[in-house]
Amino acid sequence: MVLRSLSLGTYFAGPSDIMAKILIVDDQPEICELLSTLFSSNTMVKTSRSLEEAVLALSQHNFDLVISDLSLKGRNGTEGFELLSHIRSKSPSTEVIIMTGSGTDEIKKNAIRLGAAHFFEKPIDTRSLLSQVNTILGGNHNGG
């Protein structure tokens, strides 16, 4: 199989043109819509607005990458870490990016320590996010 890098994502080009699968988890619909639009031309994108929806989606699909807000409405403010722990235990090859609107150095260190591939503070620089996603997906798929 040959890896093709495109401006808005990376995917395998093979007999069935298998696309990378991204799950976006954020309780703000506008963030889900923005990120979904950003990646949808070259990847399969699913959005979830809660920890529970994300866990259900993960049980139904094998995602290459999860981009999750740290804090989801109605919970304790660290649901992204709960999701990250869940992913590490159930699907260790799935990469995770954590994002938050109220990040501290301690939160960033915790995210990386728990296994996040990257950490972004909102508002997110979409160019940096695209670059990081291309790097992650290229690394995940490289070599088969």
Image (cartoon, helix red, strand yellow):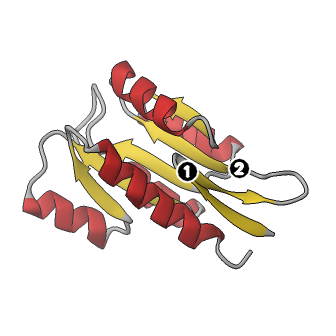
Residue type, mark 1 in image = Gly
Q: Which mark is residue 19?
A: 2
Mark 1, residues whose alpha carbon is within 10 Å: few (<14), some, or many (≥20)?
many
| Residue at left offset 27%, top offset 25% | 74
Q: Nearer the viewer, residue 46 or 8?
A: 8
Outermost residue, right direction? 15
The quarter of the image holding the N terminus is bottom right
Pointers 1 and 2 in contact (CB under 8 A)? yes
Question: Measuring 17% from the left and 39% from the top, which residue is drawn there?
Answer: 101
Left or right of residue 120: residue 106: left
* Position of residue 13 in the picture relative to residue 122 (left or right): right
Q: Nearer the viewer, mark 1 or mark 2?
A: 1
The residue beneath circle 1 is: 9
Which one is in front, 41 or 20? 41
> Closer to the camera, 33 or 84?
33
Residue 12 occupies which quadrant of the picture?
bottom right
Residue at 56% from the left image edge and 45% from the top image edge: 22
